[in-house]
Amino acid sequence: MHKNYFDAAIRTSGCCDIVGDREQADLVVDGTSVDEFNKAALIPAMISGFSFGVIPSWANIPIHLRVTATSSGEQHTYDLADSATMVTWLPMLLAMPFTGHPVTTEKDMTQNAYNTLVSRMKTDGLLTH
């Protein structure tokens, strides 16, 4: 899944071509997406759900990427983290059409993290066409 976000960020930047074989690549990118979801947030979400949103709850939706990019024997490491807060509360149902759905917000935040990664790699001179 995260490879798709990275590939989309590379394609959008228009900087280079993606190859599937390490031997053909000028730049090798290895990364890890760290799962920092707090399972304890499910309890308040269930309480809010059982009360039909009268009792509010919120949860932090994090994204954390650790990436190593290697080009010509030179390594660059990147550590990117971001998060969004999802609020479940009855009045928020009225605001949701104007603020975006939590699922799309999470996808947009994830894509933005990968776009930022590609931008930093360009700044470091790793991505040129």
Image: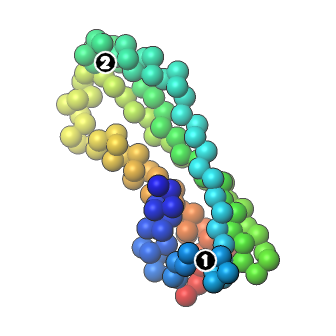
Mark linked to residue 21: 1
Quarter of the image with the C terminus is: bottom right
Classed neighbour count for the residue bearing mark 2: other residues with Cα under 10 Å, few (<14), some (14–19), many (≥20): some
Residue at left offset 23%, top offset 42%: 98
Question: Does the rendering let one see residue 123?
Answer: no
In screen coordinates, is 87 left or right of 93? Answer: right
Vertically, is 4 above or below 40?
Answer: below
Lower sequence index among marks 2 and 1:
1
Amino acid residing under circle 2: Gly
- The percent coordinates of residue 17 (x first, y second) are 51, 82
Label of residue 96 in the image = none
Seen as rendered, the residue at the extreme right is 73
Which residue is found at the position 59% from the left and 50% from the top? 33
Q: CA distance from mark 2 to mark 1?
A: 47 Å
What x and y, as percent, mark residue 81? 59, 48
Colour logic: rainbow
Question: How far from the left and from the top, in percent, is residue 82?
Answer: 54, 46
Name the residue at 65% across, 76% down: 22
Q: Amino acid at mark 1?
A: Asp
Q: Which mark is residue 49?
A: 2
